Image (tube, rainbow, N blue to C red):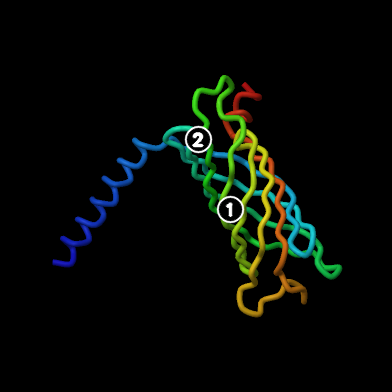
Amino acid sequence: MMNFRTAVAILSLFLLSTMVKAQYTMHKMISVGYTYQNQSFGEVGGKLLFLKNDDVIYRLGGSALMGSTDSKFAIMPKLQADVLLNFQKDVDFYHSYYFLVGAEGTNKYVAPKIGVTLFGMLDLTGGYAFPIGDTRLNGKEMKGLNINFTLNIPTVFIHDMFK
């Protein structure tokens, strides 16, 4: 009985993932940027962009925040999820800017954020970080104003440059 349930669950998961792939287009991107969270950090990572049409776009990403805190080099992993919104209809130039709503989290803080993005490639966001418990980074508390400036480069562009 347990093997049958497992087989049905795996088959259902496979079929659902096939349907999702058929409905959404996925694009891979490399991201580099700057983050201010009580300290300046450089950011390097990757994102996946999912879209069905260009009015609502979903992005998931992971990156590493690197910087110096209290004269010690520190690295924090960061996960993020964003929704890009633009409901302008009948525009000459395809949606040039989107409003961005999202959240990011590290092992030190969680930060909801809002902002704007140009073509989904150049992001400027701001939010407020809430610390997770009593965690600190080299003795410094990670809470308060959170500002992000990020450049997202689609891997298709990189591939086409070296053809």
Q: Name which residue type carries label 2.
A: Phe
Q: Secondary structure at mark 1?
A: strand
Would you say 30 lies left or right of 81 here?
Answer: right
Residue at x-position 74% and y-position 58%: 66
* Foreground pick, 141 / 42: 141
Q: Position of residue 102 (x, y in %)?
A: 56, 53
Q: Position of residue 56 (x, y in %)?
A: 48, 39
| Residue 93: mark | none
Image quarter of residue 77: bottom right
Q: Secondary structure at mark 2?
A: loop
Q: Residues within 10 Å of mark 1 (few under 14, many from 20)?
A: many
Answer with mark 1 or mark 2, whichever residue precedes in sequence.
Answer: 1
Would you say 139 lies left or right of 17 here?
Answer: right
Q: Name which residue type carries label 1.
A: Gly
Q: Residue furthest bottom?
A: 134
Image quarter of residue 5: bottom left
Quarter of the image where the C terminus is located:
top right
Q: Which residue is mark 1?
A: 62
Q: Position of residue 31 (x, y in %)?
A: 65, 44
| Residue 87: mark | 2
Would you say 116 lies left or right of 18 here?
Answer: right
Residue at x-position 71% and y-position 69%: 142
